[in-house]
Image: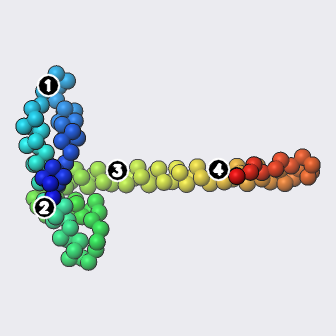
């Protein structure tokens, strides 16, 4: 049987999240952290299980963000589902922008490398720099 603590969210993370919303001088008891740890773990398992069932019925092996959003709505957590859908769209937009920016940076670097190679190849042989050894 799996150890009880291994199936729960890490208590330190739960405590850190709880403290973020509280005033700086507030204290959180160990019992409060443990209670929230159990509730949050159960909630996540409940929603993930519903999303997993949907995937299984659709013969898919991977649960994605859209499945989680669907599960929240199907389980009656419409307010959460709406918020998570908005977050998921923003997250994907940011990731798409990062990928576009990285692609542009890579292309720019390749262009500079090619220009540098062309500059060296246009020089007389005695002025061409040798490529650094990779050994």
Point out the tag, 4 or 1, that comes first from the N-terminus: 1
Image coords of residue 24 (percent x, y): 20, 24
Residue at which label 1 appears: 26
Disc 4 to disc 2, C-alpha distance = 53 Å
Disc 2 to disc 1, C-alpha distance = 37 Å
| Residues at marks 3 and 4 touching, judged by CB atoms closer than 8 Å | no
Residue at which label 4 appears: 109
SS label for mark 1: loop
Would you call the spot at circle 3 few (<14 residues within 10 Å), some (14-19), or many (20 or more)?
Answer: few
Seen in the image, is 40 located left or right of residue 92?
left
User: What is the number of callouts on the image?
Assistant: 4
Residue depth check, mark 3 versus mark 4: number of the one nearer the observer: 4
Point out the tag, 2 or 1, that comes first from the N-terminus: 2
Residue at 19% in and 48% down: 9
Residue at which label 3 appears: 90
Kindly identify which numbered label has been placed on residue 126: none
Q: Quadrant of residue 88?
A: bottom left
Image coords of residue 22 (percent x, y): 16, 29
């Amino acid at each position: 049987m799996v150890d009880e603590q291994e199936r729960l969210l890490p208590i330190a993370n739960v405590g850190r999240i709880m403290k973020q919303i509280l005033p700086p001088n507030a204290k959180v008891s160990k019992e409060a952290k443990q209670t929230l740890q159990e509730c949050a773990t159960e909630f996540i398992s409940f929603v993930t299980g519903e999303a997993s069932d949907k995937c299984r019925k659709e013969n898919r092996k991977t649960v994605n963000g859209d499945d989680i959003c669907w599960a929240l709505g199907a389980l009656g957590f419409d307010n959460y589902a709406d918020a998570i859908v908005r977050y998921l769209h923003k997250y994907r937009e940011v990731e798409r922008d990062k990928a576009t920016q990285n692609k542009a940076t890579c292309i720019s670097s390749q262009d500079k490398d090619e220009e540098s190679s062309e500059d060296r190849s246009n020089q007389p042989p005695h002025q061409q720099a040798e490529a650094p050894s990779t050994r």
